[in-house]
Image (spheres, rainbow, N blue to C red):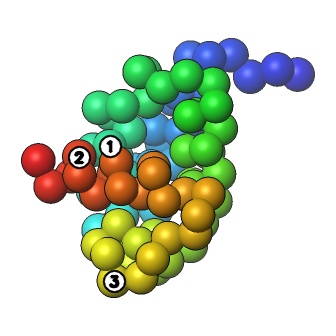
Amino acid sequence: MTETYEHRLKRMQMRSMRRGIKEMDIILSAYAQSNLSKMDESQLDLYDQLLDENDQDLYQWVTGQVVAPDSLQILIKDISQTFQK
């Protein structure tokens, strides 16, 4: 069964809000709310991939403590810059 676009956005928004650590709940839910509806299919695929990552790793990447994997660097940079605004 194929997931509808609307359902996918809702699922990704929910996964952004219900993370393992509160800091990532705040960061990703704010980013998702502002950006998911503007993303194309490939950007949504990448964000979906990011949601499978460990919160401790994500937090270190977003805060610049550790360099993110090459495949996620652009998205991580966008999340970091969006949250700092």
Q: Amino acid at mark 1?
A: Tyr
Estimate the spatial distance between the alpha carbons at disc 1 and disc 3, rounded to whole Å: 19 Å
* Real-space Cα separation, disc 3 to disc 2, in angstroms: 17 Å
Q: Disc 3 designates what residue?
A: 65
The numbered dot on residue 82 is 2
Tag nearer the camera, 1 or 2: 2
| Mark 2 residue type | Thr
Tags 3 and 2 in contact by the CB under 8 Å rule? Answer: no
Indicate left or right for 80 with 18 as reference. Answer: left
Q: Is residue 75 left or right of residue 29?
A: right
Where is the N terminus found, in terms of image quarters?
Answer: top right
Q: Which comes before the other along the chain, label 1 or label 3?
A: 1
Q: For marks 1 and 3, give the one nearer the viewer.
A: 3
- Classed neighbour count for the residue bearing mark 1: other residues with Cα under 10 Å, few (<14), some (14–19), many (≥20): some
Residue 57 at what x, y percent from top left? 49, 77
Work out which residue is located at the far bottom of the displayed protein and give it: 65
The image position of residue 73, as x and y in percent, is 48, 59
The crowding category of the residue bearing disc 3, from other C-alpha atoms within 10 Å (few below 14, some 14 to 19, many at least 20), is: few
Please name whichever residue, 22 or 75, is drawn nearer the observer in this view of the structure: 75
Q: Residues within 10 Å of mark 2 (few under 14, many from 20)?
A: some
**Residue 63 point in image, percent of width and height:** 29, 73
Residue position marked by numbered label 1 in the rendering:
31
Residue for point 23% across, 46% down = 82
Secondary structure of the residue carrying numbered label 1: helix
Q: Amino acid at mark 3?
A: Gln
Q: Residue at x 45, y 50 (%)?
A: 75
Vertical placement of residue 38 versus 58, above or below: above
SS of the residue at dot 2?
Answer: helix
- Mark 1–mark 2 Cα distance, whole angstroms, equals 7 Å
Among numbered discs 3 and 2, the one appearing first in the sequence: 3
Furthest residue toward left: 85
